[in-house]
Image (cartoon, helix red, strand yellow):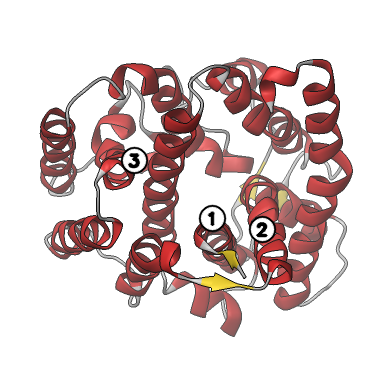
Amino acid sequence: MSPLLWPILAAVRFILALIVAGSHLRWFFPNNHLAITLERLSSIVAVIGFLIISGFSIAASYARQPAGFYGRRALRIIPLYLLAIAAGALCTTFFGGRVAVADGSAFGPPSLGLVLQNVFFLQGFTTSSMLTNGVIWSLSIEVLFYLLTPLLARLSQTSLLLLAGSSLALFVAASWFALPKYPDMQGGLAFVLLGWCWLAGFIAYRHAKWLEASAGVLVCSLLALTTYALNLELHWPVTLVLVAVAIGIGDRLRGPRRLGEVLNLLGDASYPLYLFHLPFFFILTGLKLHWSGFAYLGAAVVLAVVLDRCYDQPIKHLARHLWPSLK
């Protein structure tokens, strides 16, 4: 029997990606039952869950092997990210430059300047995300935390708690003001307001008892989002509980190696599913295939697996062969 902590977290990442994809599926199928069900779990809370798991995972990665950390992170995110930028830039180009969603809104290609700034993870700082692939707004937060990880690793738990608490307080307070949505924020505001999520995961990993740490993360997150002034979807607490339970008890669970492999496969598909579902939905709509919402989402999952196995994994394998320090 093999440990299941990381496979379980991988599967949770896949579920979070499905929640975000389901929320966007409603742009194209507003009455689709599957999309409504996934949207009720809250896409913004799913992103919060992503950030918590990211902080937890990065703390583990850096603790195990500080050497080559930046190279490993770059290899993890950049190949698929650059392809997702291209997909977002080009997904409406071949359909008269515009693709309409169910409410009649039409989306066109972003400007070259916007694309270039997104390439360098400047969305949220000097510009917004491209509308045709708005989910990439969260990647700039992740990347900045990657860059700061060696510094954060030197801080005490008390210092990290102070930083996380300050961000959490600002997150709640900011919800009472008329601010742009997270994909439209600039000046690093999203990084400041959501920094507590990533730091919560980072702090949880460094805590001696993960069950206790995950309970603390869950309680703080539930309290923060309960006092959040903006409306959240109906079942948002379920999403937070799922993340906290996975962190809290995942290390206590054991299972067949084959089960771990299947869960890891889902986790590997989560990143391309998150990055590519929206441009893919635009392409399917532009092609006028008249598929169902279920077929849209199923095809996006298949595409994510193909991108992982046929594009991302070969690039990683080659890079690790050429530079063994990236293993």
Instruction: Answer yes or no: is residue 93 visible.
Output: no
Q: Secondary structure at mark 1?
A: helix
Q: Position of residue 141 (x, y in %)?
A: 41, 31
Q: Position of residue 269 (x, y in %)?
A: 70, 54
Mark 1 lies on residue: 6
Q: Are marks 3 and 1 in contact (CB under 8 Å)?
A: no
Mark 2 lies on residue: 264
Nearer the observer, 28 or 50: 50
The quarter in which the C terminus is drawn is top right
State the residue lying farthest toward the front.
1
First reached walking from the N terminus: tag 2 or tag 3: 3
- The quarter of the picture where residue 221 lies is bottom left
Q: CA distance from mark 1 to mark 2?
A: 8 Å
On screen, 306 above or below 180? below
Q: Position of residue 20 (x, y in %)?
A: 53, 59
Which residue: 36% across, 68% down? 245
Q: Secondary structure at mark 3?
A: helix
Mark 3 lies on residue: 198
Q: How many marks?
A: 3
